[in-house]
Amino acid sequence: MPAKIEFQQSASLNQPQSDICFGSGSNSVSFRFTKSLRLLCAADFKPVFDDAPLRASHQYFLILARFNQQTQPRLGLVMAKKHMKLAVERNRMKRLIRESFRTQQEALSGLDIVVLSRKGMDSLSNSEFSQQLNQQWQRIFKKLRHHRLTSQTQNPEAKQKVDTDAKATDH
């Protein structure tokens, strides 16, 4: 009769993971990609597809963004099988986009964002894709600042928020 083997879990596995936070007090930022940061259903995606004032187009992907009524950004991904045949490639791109979004989420606050794939996206290496995606985020930030500055002339109370947002995105 074989001996009974017992496995012990370390104490750290039994405890819930805490959010990774940077900063102090109420200004701390969680870098987790929780459900509240995702566009989950067609009703969430539709307003972004219908009217996206912020767009950044690239040969291999398109970023559409629209203002939401929340303080946090939300991300939706559309990775077409037509453009990337292998699921492993679609998943790789989704991971890279989510990671980039997660690190940029403070600067993207108040936006609903959809990233759409285009043909050839899977041919990029991780570093090439990350670099291209960061360039497109910068274009979105520039358009966002411009939009907030033009709306500031109509609403002078928004000036303080624009100034703080510009400092945050300049880093």
Image (tube, rainbow, N blue to C red):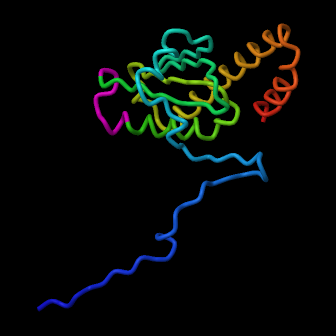
Q: Is residue 47 magenta?
A: no
User: Does residue 153 appear to the left or right of 48 in the view shown?
Assistant: right
Residue 154 vertical position relative to residue 31 in the rendered view, above or below: above
Depth check: 161 or 102 in front? 161
Placement of the C terminus among the 4 image quadrants: top right
Where residue 41 sits: x, y (%)? Answer: 41, 26
Placement of the N terminus among the 4 image quadrants: bottom left
Query: What residue appears at the point 62 percent right and 14 percent down from the top-left corner?
Result: 54
User: Does residue 120 appear to the left or right of 39 in the view shown?
Assistant: left
Query: What residue appears at the point 56 percent right and 30 percent down from the top-left corner?
Result: 74
Residues in magenta, as a range: 82-90
Where residue 87 sits: x, y (%)? Answer: 30, 36
Query: What residue appears at the point 70 percent right and 16 percent down from the top-left corner?
Result: 143
Task: Name the residue at the left extreme.
Answer: 1
Depth check: 4 or 115 in front? 4
Q: Is residue 86 magenta?
A: yes
Which image quadrant for residue 137?
top right
Where residue 45 sits: x, y (%)? Answer: 46, 20
Residue 34 vertical position relative to residue 145 in the rendered view, above or below: below
User: Does residue 71 appear to the left or right of 55 in the view shown?
Assistant: right
Where residue 96 sits: x, y (%)? Answer: 50, 38
